[in-house]
Amino acid sequence: VSTQSTWGPLFIVLHFTKLETWQLPSGHTLAYLLLNSWVGTNLSDVLQAQSVLLTSPLVATLGLSLTIPIAMVSDWWFHQMTVDLRYGVGSCFVVTGFVLVNIADYLPPPRILSNLAAGPSTIEPQQ
């Protein structure tokens, strides 16, 4: 709402002063815009919700952060772009964190935590 109320009058002024003319996109362009909006918002939200259900919120969120290293590798592979050493080291930390969190899901819980999770009836009172 704030975007429409702020920029709407400005767009009208720009259109009538001929500084920036406004027109509807062509059907071909509109089809690409609709496809992009569907894939970029709707499909990604559904896949994110599904990943939370299949794994955990932590793993799903860390999985989203893998877009940074993937973007770095794809820029290097497809566009021959070099990256700063700090960017590469940071991406290695992101990937390492994702791997460690996934490994931790398969490890047995620490003994003290498993005793606490069992409930207060199994904890021996100290005398």
Image (cartoon, rainbow, N blue to C red):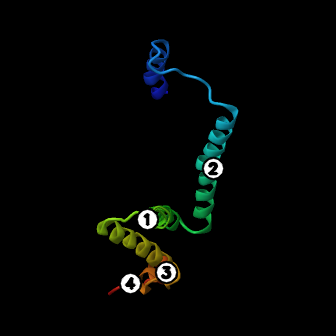
Quote the CA–CA distance across marks 2 and 3: 31 Å
Disc 3 on helix, strand or loop? helix
Q: Are marks 1 and 2 in contact (CB under 8 Å)?
A: no
Q: Are marks 3 and 1 in contact (CB under 8 Å)?
A: no
Residue 29, picture quadrant: top right
Q: Are marks 3 and 4 in contact (CB under 8 Å)?
A: no
Give the mark nearer the N terminus: 1 vs 2: 2
Q: Residue at x 41, y 76 (%)?
A: 96
Q: Residue at x 53, y 64 (%)?
A: 60
Residue 97, picture quadrant: bottom left
Q: Nearer the viewer, residue 58 or 123?
A: 58
Give the mark nearer the N terminus: 2 vs 4: 2
- Label 3 crowd (10 A; few <14 / some 14-19 / many >=20): few
Q: On the image, numbered disc 2 is attached to which residue?
A: 39
Q: On the image, numbered disc 1 is attached to which residue?
A: 80
Give the mark nearer the N terminus: 3 vs 4: 3
Q: Nearer the viewer, residue 112 or 99?
A: 99
Q: Is residue 31 above or below residue 8?
A: below
Q: On the image, numbered disc 3 is attached to which residue?
A: 103
Q: Nearer the viewer, mark 3 or mark 4?
A: 3
- Label 4 crowd (10 A; few <14 / some 14-19 / many >=20): few
Number of the label disc, if any, that sits on residue 125: 4
Q: Nearer the viewer, residue 61 or 34?
A: 34
Q: Nearer the viewer, mark 1 or mark 2?
A: 1
Quote the CA–CA distance across marks 3 and 1: 33 Å
